[in-house]
Image: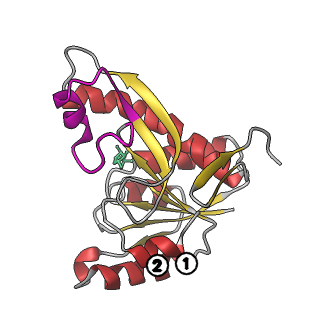
Amino acid sequence: KNIVILISGRGSNMEAVVRAAENEGWPARIAAVISNKPEAKGLEFAKARGIPTAVVANKDFSSRAEFDAALQESIDRFAPDLVVLAGFMRILTAPFVAHYEGRMLNIHPSLLPLFPGLGTHQQALDAGETEHGATVHFVTAELDHGPVVAQARVPVLPDDTEDTLSARVLVEEHKLYPHAVRLFVEDRLSITDGEVRITNAAP
Ligand code: GRF
């Protein structure tokens, strides 16, 4: 299976997926890492690993539709079976999302449906939540609303700040996302009519 990973910045989730694919011998290869920001830190890690990288800079395009078309072209050059959004900070147009229906995953740092959008950790603190976490979901046209694949939970502690809480969640993201992507590449994760199916044994 070919995986294309999209990033915008640090890329620590991308790194976790790349390492797991390698260490666990997945039936998959990371075909490319693509960023919408030329300065994304994660590109360096990918290059050092010999993974093909590409930049499709959104600032070079005057509309979302044009950017998404260029991004799609860049992604499809690598013939992906799965597109993995890993800290990819762009809202995607409906045609783009439709093109990758059933084969695009995202990780979001909250227990969806709680706290879609940005600033999730502070929102969880402000709401007085005692539990917080991360969600992997299939991407649909509505931001952070796609069908849930898997979630990881962490406690919110009394002295938590945005930094301590986000760090605790990130540790879990780095386990959760590789787990979910692995299910997909082993043909154990699928979605039909909006319903997620996970099977235990590899077929
Ligand atoms: C992660 O918290 C992810 O859940 C969110 O953006 C952050 C990206 O971090 N979508 P990284 O670039 O993977 O380090």
Question: Toward which corner of the image does residue 149 lie, by quadrant?
Answer: top right
- Measured from the top left, where is residue 196 in percent x and y? 61, 50
Tell me the quarter of the image containing the N terminus: bottom right
Question: Residue 90: horizontal and vertical position, in percent?
Answer: 31, 64
Q: For mark 1, what is the residue?
A: 76
Task: Decide: is 62 above or below 41.
Answer: below
Residue closest to the far right: 203
Q: Position of residue 125 (x, y in %)?
A: 20, 28
128 in the magenta segment: yes
Question: Label for residue 86?
Answer: none
Q: Looking at the image, which residue sits at the far top?
A: 158
What amino acid type should be assigned to the residue bearing mark 1?
Answer: Asp
Q: Is ligand 1 within 8 Å of the beta carbon of the residue shown at mark 1?
A: no
**Label 2: few (<14), some (14–19) or many (≥20) C-alpha neighbours in 10 Å:** some
Task: Tell me whether the residue at label 1 lies in contact with that at label 2, contact meaning CB atoms closer than 8 angstroms.
Answer: yes
In this view of the protein, which residue sits in the foreground, 182 or 144?
Answer: 144
What range is drawn magenta here? 111-133
Question: Hey, what amino acid is under mark 2?
Answer: Gln
Left or right, 155 with respect to 197, comes to left
Could you give the CA–CA distance between mark 1 and mark 2, rounded to whole angstroms? Answer: 6 Å
Secondary structure beneath label 2: helix
Residue closer to the observer: 32 or 85: 85
What colour-coding does the image apply? secondary structure
Q: Please state if 73 lies on the left or on the right of 198 as rendered.
A: left
Q: Eyeballing the image, is 44 above or below 77?
A: above
Residue 37 sits inside the magenta stretch = no
Label 1: element kind: helix
Q: Which residue is mark 2?
A: 72
